[in-house]
Amino acid sequence: MSTTEELFNKDLNDVHLIYDYDVVVDGVHEKETGTIVSLVLDIPNKKITTMLGFSKGHWENAEEAHGDKRNPEDLERWRKLARIGIQTDRHMLSEQADIHTVETNRIYESASIQSLQSIAFMSVHSTHLAAKHSFSKTYTPSITLIADQGVQGDCHAGKTLQKSTAKSTTKPNVRQVHLLNYELFTSLASDGFQIQPGALGENITTYGIDLLNLATGSYLYFGIGEEGPVVQVTGLRNPGPGVEKFKSGLLDRVKYKAEGKTVRRLGVMGVVIRASILWPGGY
């Protein structure tokens, strides 16, 4: 067992290396193996969820993650992170948690790991948009996320609500982006509902991300470094009559009572924090 794996298991319990993906380093395709986990960090007065990638071997050589080019002065920070194999945006924790260094020991001293969930991998399955208001959205090879606006060219983009009355047009638009997990389509198919991604109105169809259990205010970082888009979760989507109009009987599958609480399964809404192009693929 490598030093990286020993520290990995010591600090984060027994998390196995469970996914493979292709990376490109200096134009050469390589096979990378690692594990991605979801961490909920409990920090005084703040609770955040971050997606951290753990890779085997890649960081032991202190190489730049996935060929991502970084400033030479930042390399020492990445070498420190390499000691336990954490790959993450160097600003991700410091900005959200008021931690001014990403050295691993400082992270663990300042924040306790409240929960740790191992998943196979996290990815964007597909992207969609609709220029005009409609229940469903159309597949597109990629989408451009605009900060504080939403998806470029989508009918729901804008700083203020798009379907408000004249008296409420100044309300901030907290539903700029709709994210929905692909696993829902699989579940609905077992109930006899054959529905394709985008048909339920989402902009981003994810895979491997437990969207419904993300706390309001959580940040989703797509990619590593400072160029990937960032979306902040603003809440669950509340399924309405349009769902039932789309397919009879569907509303009862995505919104219902369980143990005295209302369960909503139609994904989450969010706002764009950092702009960039979002492509389907692993993150």
Image: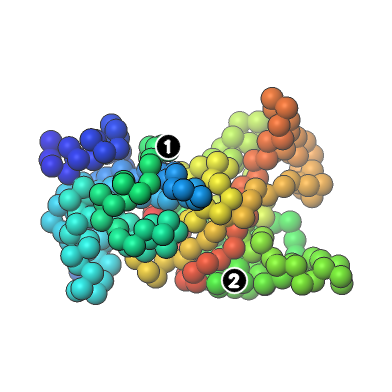
Crowding around mark 2 (Cα neighbors within 10 Å: few <14, some 14 to 19, many 20+) is many
Type of the residue with mark 1:
Ser
Q: Is residue 22 left or right of residue 161?
A: left
Q: Residue at x 79, y 65 (%)?
A: 163
Residue corresponding to mark 2: 148
Distance from label 1 to label 2 (Cα)?
Answer: 30 Å
Instruction: Name the side, left or right, on which 23 lies relative to 264.
Output: left
Q: Where is residue 150 drawn, in percent x and y?
A: 60, 68
- Residue 13: x percent and y percent? 29, 33
Q: Nearer the viewer, residue 96 or 234?
A: 96
Label 1 vs label 2, nearer the camera: 1
Tag 2, which secondary structure? loop
Task: Give the residue displayed 31% in from the left and 46% down from the top.
Answer: 108
The answer to whether 20 is drawn above or below residue 262 in the figure is below
Extreme residue in the front direction? 44
Residue nearest the viewer, comparing 258 with 32: 258
Q: Secondary structure at mark 1?
A: strand
Q: Is residue 239 visible?
A: yes
Q: Residue tagged by mark 1?
A: 115
Q: Residue furthest top?
A: 259
Can residue 22 be seen here? The reply is no
Where is residue 180? Give x, y as percent: 58, 49
Q: Along the horizontal axis of the image, is 250 left or right of 233?
A: right
- The label shown at residue 147 is none
Q: Amino acid at mark 2?
A: Asp
Front-most of 75 and 151? 75
